[in-house]
Image (cartoon, grey):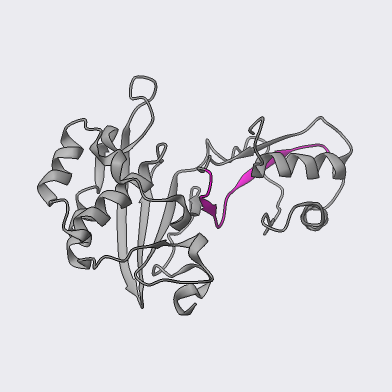
């Protein structure tokens, strides 16, 4: 929720108040995303007393919600389920376009410079494992731990797109965007692998200068116990031809 800004949570609550005719309800998401960042499959849990069936709730919510927020599925959860605390991992997808696109500029980071994809792959591997990524976040390390387990970073070229999927235990504020920004600087030839390694080992403010824009970033999937990883990394909405 934001006092002076439109948010997904705020829109959802407004819709829920109308449907359930009560203020006695709560909605909790699996996590926050920065302004301008997209979510493909955000998970949230709603605490409310109702006799409405899950499918009816989904239909009624979608009737009340604005066009850019869509409820894909509603199901009854276990009484102690928590969308954020029960999540075991998350994956983010970043889309970089190497050509100008008229229709999907809100969903990519367009880069004019030539990028060395192999070097970008090499840079991405440096982040895998349990690392203290204090150089790659705007979070205060004195207020919360900046150690993150990055289990995997996948990279793939699809036409004029470069796709980067980051799979990890949890994510810090601006972490993915700063990791992607640094990987891109390596691809541009403006940063070396040794410099990236130094940022990981020693606290530095440099990566903040390379923060990737929110337009290309998607919260792709939230994982719970027993969920399987997604298959091959694919572009969002088949935008590769647009």
Q: Is residue 32 magenta?
A: no
Q: In the image, is 91 to the left or to the right of 21?
A: left
Q: In the image, is 191 to the left or to the right of 33?
A: left
Q: Position of residue 6 (x, y in %)?
A: 67, 41
Residue 110 in view of the camera: yes
Labels in figure, total: 0
At 21% from the left and 60% from the top, the residue drawn is: 187
Residue 16 position by quadrant: top right
Residue 158 position by quadrant: bottom left
At 67% from the left and 54% from the top, the residue drawn is: 69
Q: Nearer the viewer, residue 30 or 111?
A: 111
Q: Nearer the viewer, residue 226 or 196?
A: 196
Q: Which residues are magenta?
A: 35-49
Residue 152 position by quadrant: bottom left
At 40% from the left and 58% from the top, the residue drawn is: 94
Q: Is residue 47 magenta?
A: yes
Q: Position of residue 118 (x, y in %)?
A: 18, 66
Q: In the image, is 62 to the left or to the right of 155?
A: right
Q: 91 above or below 170?
A: below
Name the dominant secondary structure of the magenta segment: loop
Q: Position of residue 221 (x, y in %)?
A: 50, 54
Q: Nearer the viewer, residue 101 or 170?
A: 101
**Looking at the figure, which quarter contains the N terminus?**
top right
> Residue extending furthest top?
142
Q: Position of residue 126 (x, y in %)?
A: 19, 49
Residue 50 in view of the camera: no
At 36% from the left and 75% from the top, the residue drawn is: 160
């Amino acid at each position: 929720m934001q006092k002076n800004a439109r948010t997904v949570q705020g829109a959802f609550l407004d819709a829920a108040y109308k449907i359930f005719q009560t203020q006695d309800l709560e909605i909790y998401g699996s996590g926050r995303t920065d302004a301008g960042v997209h979510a493909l499959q955000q998970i949230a849990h709603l605490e409310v007393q109702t006799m409405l069936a899950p499918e009816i709730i989904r239909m009624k919510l979608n009737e009340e919600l604005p066009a850019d927020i869509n409820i894909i599925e509603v199901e009854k959860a276990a009484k102690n389920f928590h969308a954020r605390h029960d999540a075991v991992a998350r994956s983010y997808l970043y889309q970089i376009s190497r050509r100008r696109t008229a229709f999907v500029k809100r969903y990519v980071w367009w880069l004019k410079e030539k990028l060395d994809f192999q070097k970008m792959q090499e840079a991405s591997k440096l982040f895998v494992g349990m690392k203290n990524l204090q150089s790659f976040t705007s979070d205060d390390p004195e207020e919360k731990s900046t150690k993150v387990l990055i289990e995997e970073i996948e990279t793939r070229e699809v036409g004029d797109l470069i796709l980067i999927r980051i799979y990890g235990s949890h994510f810090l504020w601006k972490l993915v965007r700063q990791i992607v920004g640094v990987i891109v600087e390596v691809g541009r030839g403006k940063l070396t692998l040794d410099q990236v390694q130094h940022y990981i080992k020693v606290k530095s403010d440099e990566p903040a200068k390379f923060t990737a824009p929110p337009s290309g970033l998607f919260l792709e999937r939230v994982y719970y116990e027993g969920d399987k990883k997604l298959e091959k990394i694919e572009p969002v909405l088949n935008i590769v031809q647009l």
